[in-house]
Amino acid sequence: MWNKGLIIGWIWSCCLATVAFGQQHPTLTLTKEGVQDIRKQMPQAPLFMETLEQMQQKIDKVVREEIAVPVPKDPAGGYTHEKHKENSRLMYQASVLYQLTGEQKYAGFVTELLEAYAEMYPTLLEHPIKKSYAPGKLFWQLLNESVWLVYVAQAYDGVYDYLTEKQRERITTDLLKPFAHFLSAENPEVFNRIHNHGVWAVAAVGMTGYVLEDQALVNKALYGMELTAGIAHKEKGEAGFYTHLDALFSPDGYYTEGPYYHRYALTPFMLFALAIENNEPKRQIFKYRDGILLKTVETLLQLTNVDGTFFPFNDAIKGMDYTTSSLVAGVDLLYAYGKKDPALLSIVEEQNTVLLNQAGLNVALALADGKQQPFNRTSLVITDGSSGDEGGIGILRTGKGKEQWTTSMKYTSHGLSHGHFDKLSLLMYEGAQEILQDYGAVRYVNVKQKEGGRYLPENKTWAHQTIAHNTLIVDETSHYDGDKRKSSKHHGVLVYAQQEKEFQALYAMDTTAYSGVRMGRKLVMIEGTSDREAVMLDVFSAESEEVHQYDLAYHYQGQVMNADFIESTANQQMQVLGQSNGYQHLWKEGEGISQESNTTFTWLKGNRFYSIASINETGTRYLLGRLGANDPKFNLRRDPVLIQRRTGKHARFINVIIPHGGRNQVTELTNRTETPIAEVKELTLMKGYEGVTITWKNGEELQVFWSTEKTMTKDKHQIEYKGYKYQWEGPVYVSAMK
Amino acid sequence: MWNKGLIIGWIWSCCLATVAFGQQHPTLTLTKEGVQDIRKQMPQAPLFMETLEQMQQKIDKVVREEIAVPVPKDPAGGYTHEKHKENSRLMYQASVLYQLTGEQKYAGFVTELLEAYAEMYPTLLEHPIKKSYAPGKLFWQLLNESVWLVYVAQAYDGVYDYLTEKQRERITTDLLKPFAHFLSAENPEVFNRIHNHGVWAVAAVGMTGYVLEDQALVNKALYGMELTAGIAHKEKGEAGFYTHLDALFSPDGYYTEGPYYHRYALTPFMLFALAIENNEPKRQIFKYRDGILLKTVETLLQLTNVDGTFFPFNDAIKGMDYTTSSLVAGVDLLYAYGKKDPALLSIVEEQNTVLLNQAGLNVALALADGKQQPFNRTSLVITDGSSGDEGGIGILRTGKGKEQWTTSMKYTSHGLSHGHFDKLSLLMYEGAQEILQDYGAVRYVNVKQKEGGRYLPENKTWAHQTIAHNTLIVDETSHYDGDKRKSSKHHGVLVYAQQEKEFQALYAMDTTAYSGVRMGRKLVMIEGTSDREAVMLDVFSAESEEVHQYDLAYHYQGQVMNADFIESTANQQMQVLGQSNGYQHLWKEGEGISQESNTTFTWLKGNRFYSIASINETGTRYLLGRLGANDPKFNLRRDPVLIQRRTGKHARFINVIIPHGGRNQVTELTNRTETPIAEVKELTLMKGYEGVTITWKNGEELQVFWSTEKTMTKDKHQIEYKGYKYQWEGPVYVSAMK
């Protein structure tokens, strides 16, 4: 059964790797034996071959052109910035091609560039664009510098055998060593920072350490730089790769900055881990902390919508999805070092590319064997915090495949510098379409005109603010008064998550975001039947000893179909909605009150209709807001928001959200353009219980009951309502009557 | 070579059809012999079989359910409206299934419905919803009534043989005859109206005439109703089908209301024509007026963008495309009765369905033989007006396939009641993406909440107005003061259309839209090279003896990337841009002037960047507008517009529009985010000549020269510029220098 060559390769690899620094090259993300194995087997792995050939096509063009190593000058998006970025990738890719094809032209190209950089690097001072807290030399910020070295260390590793001793020495002395020194000893604050900038720096320096056989450098990367010279490295310190693995992930693998940065930080985690595994397999790095490196990839995959796009929590550019290169690495390595889950292979199919190393080969071979299974996203709760006790994220999902209806609620910790003030905020999708959006970040990555692609001022003044999220805003201020330091000390709390056949429930609370205000949000997602749609009950309560203004924001998108209770207030002029905390960016398009017991707000997005049916309380004001005020550089999208506003000590917002009907723009047929819900009514029940009745226009009635006191899964309940007795276990109960 | 059965079928069909009213059933869009032929051959035509099976799956479900023929009550979008619409289609489809499969259940279903309608119809008075100038009985407007009868006449035809004599008599006496009478004698104004409402009425009555063997009805349909009783029908009158064929189409096949209504009116044209062909082949209806019925389908196909969507001229709902059922009929019949153009088959592939008659069979057989060729859209000029002398539309296209860059300019006549005040307006697409949009219509078809799906008030106050289009607005008024009657008397004029290898030019004028103002717009689309993008030069001139305010509007979409010369004017409050003629719906988001010789406005749509480089004249104001003011029911999209404003007797706007670069949201790579154009400069040339230089950042220079006096294709020109001599033929010349 065993291929003889394979066994030998495996034994070699094992024995070599335990002997650190007696190694042959390559030794980082490829190994010498791995390369021999790949060359033998790759013809049987079509996706591997396609990836290789695509890279070859690209690099074959490039190696014919003259190289360019310009003096650093431009900001992100500018020529020199993009060129140096590109060069690092090209060197890496050409070095891989050299390994896998043996063609000298690739190694020659890498050598030429490495020598050019070795010539220029000693002449460089700090980058002329002074916009970063940590400027680089090739780039305006150190972060890009780290990324560059991660690729170039691998490139050097790949052509090591091709280089003369003299070339090696020059590249080592004039480029790699001082570069790693600059990233570590000269910038210890960044290097020791527990943050994605730190991970990249650590990985760059650690990989350079392995390739240069410099144990001191490797140790710095693993355990952190001592800020005071002369103190021995701790086995586990407050910095370095191990600390990143301990501190940045929850036991569930949630990365505290959120999915967008999770994805970004994943590359150095994965590549450095692979280098550790190849050089020091005794460390069993992929098993460290119960296999946190693999777990975190699984978790990130669950934090995507059906189209593979990441939930845009915190600072996040929308549209980023799991076909990104870091997830190619993540998924391939998860498959290779994990349980060989065949569902991962269907993601690889969508990625349509693999790592050009042994992990990628394994994945491509499994795909060639037709082992792929569908990837399922499930309802789940994910903890935040290095000990898993700093809140988290709950995700409710119903329906299958590409039509799945997905809602998440966020009650995490702040999420470092990229965190938003968004406690108890929702995201909601139906299939690939957003129903309730998170704005994401105000940034146009790598667009020179937009401040060189950096975060724009409105990212802080709008996107970070609470009003930019689907949650409750008290007194037009943001959570924790918009103070990141305060916010970083707190987190929300999950009270319960309950999963039944007919419904799912999630209840989270927060008592810290607003001093003296207890907030709780209860979601009950009720499955659809052949007679009616699935529906989401959203109960948001706030209690205080003081009188407050409570605003519940729903960031719908698309076109208003029906809002009879809201009058347009925007005729000759339109007023800004508020003065600060993000409200200064919203125009007031409409305002209204209603005398009815319920209000229904219906909108059209794409070809689907959505409604929010609300229990109306006297004094509730409904506001329609529109982004775009105080936006001098036209940086914001003109997106809308519905705000439900109440004033008092307490407020309880009961809303039922439902997708319904549709239209076809070619046949012009429509159906169920109006909400199918006739009424939503709050129930008066015995002490300790609350509930809601949802009545459909077809006559069907749903009773939703919940206990306000006993919230454990095994708690038993019995109540009477309208002469019927109801008995159940667990905090929430849903009963359908016709 | 000839299949014997086929020849016999063909001979029979020919001989039968010449004997009008001795016919067998079916006789309208199917024929008895055709059905025999289809049954024989359809197993060899997979697409035909798929279409049939899909219809069967749908109707098999329906025939098991109870029928519903409710008393008319609801507006468009409401239950009774949708039900009667649906019933007519179901009857038609079931009758086709009966013919093609012979299964009695289908005929039984049709019979049951026909009898139910025959029972109800005599009891009906005018429809309770009084919103139409021509109310119906089953529906709120007569138009729906006509459409209903077009389908039901065919349904009756399909089950004729199945019905007893008594059933036939009852359905004829109580339903079909009075129904046709209501559409013609009782509503002569609609029946004789040269308009899509008239075409539907005529087709319904004519098809009913054939099926009832009632020559008088057929004649009314062909030649129109006499408004005064007792006067004999004219051979060619001022109404009826022939008049529609004469008056509604230009010799180029342009339908005066524009593509959206063209598509809508096409169904009755095509179906009635087929019925005429099957019953009176001597009329050679498909050859009438040089084959206008086939020509008009070809023209409509050219009035689509690369994704098959129709240009949204005049009142038009965006998203409608050539997979719509009327174009299925149109394309199948064009193939069957035209030149068997294999490019049509690739459209059939996209439609993925065929007519279930002989034309559809032919198409499906040709597809099964693999005869399809790509469909090419070309640059062309299409005349408007029944004699082809009422202006028209010019279309410039460059690039191939799905990436084609398309610009159209409209200088047609008004276009009846659905026309817009949009002389010299542009539409611009790159691939499927709109670069400069026409708003389309303000209407949500069949959405009950939106006034039952009717045109909304903002359709007149915004969408009809000149400011809603990419053209020049003088003194904030619309063309012809927004007076449809005035507008209907005039049209624009094509001065020239020139097509060369390196560029295409189009020049149209209008002197009627604004009293005392001569307007001319010149487009020069210059092909791209490997070094630079394709580019569009847009020169809009206006001349008058009086001082006017000239506004040139560009309806861009997406996000502003760069507009340094425009300051946001929208902080604490935002003002409306004007008081009437559509300006009352626009907010003023920004305003600015520039001291530079050029200004550049760049925006991002999807993942592509677009720039407009403008020659700046002292006193030019740049305004950013945003839709949404005075929109009490939130009917309008919040779309943006850039306005260039000048005041004086004359104004000449010189703009260069260019798509460039792009971004990838997953790799986050961007390129050419800034305009590649360095400068646009007007040239001073010898008398009778004008010109522009476009200088690229890469140093390339393009000189564009044109004659202001000699505008014929064969005119020869010679000028000197900067010491060089230039010689050319035709009005415009483009010279590239590096």
Image (cartoon, coloured by chain):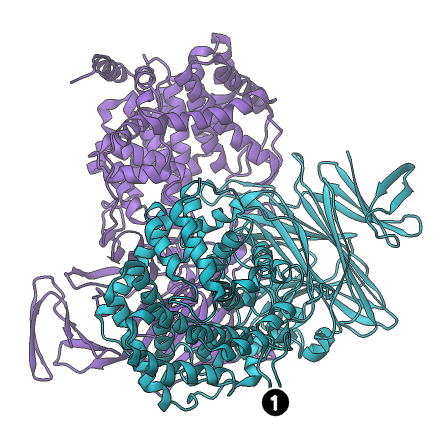
Chain colours: A purple, B cyan
Query: In which quarter of the view is residue A239 placed?
Result: top left
Q: Which corner quadrant holds the C terminus of chain B?
A: top right
Residue A700 placement, left or right of A43: left
Q: Which residue is mark 1?
A: B228
| Circle 1 chain | B
* CA neighbours of label 1 inside 10 A, class few (<14), some (14 to 19), many (20+): few
Q: Residue at x 23, y 14 (%)?
A: A15
| Nearer to me, B202 or B158 | B158
Q: Please, is residue B350 above or below residue B211 in the view?
A: above
Percent position of residue B154, x then y: 40, 69
| Nearer to me, A7 or A393 | A7
Q: Please, is residue A442 above or below residue B152 in the view?
A: above
| Nearer to me, A282 or A260 | A260
Residue A454: tell me if it is visible. no
Q: Amino acid at mark 1?
A: Thr
Q: Please, is residue B196 above or below residue A617 in the view?
A: above
Query: In which quarter of the view is residue B588 placed?
Result: bottom right
SS of the residue under disc 1: loop
Residue A474 placement, left or right of B283: left
Q: Which corner quadrant holds the N terminus of chain B?
A: top left
Percent position of residue A671, x then y: 35, 70
Percent position of residue A633, x then y: 60, 58
Percent position of residue B576, x then y: 63, 75
Numbered disc total: 1
Query: In which quarter of the view is residue A618 placed?
Result: bottom left
Q: Residue at x 27, y 39 (%)?
A: A344
| Nearer to me, B387 or B19 | B19
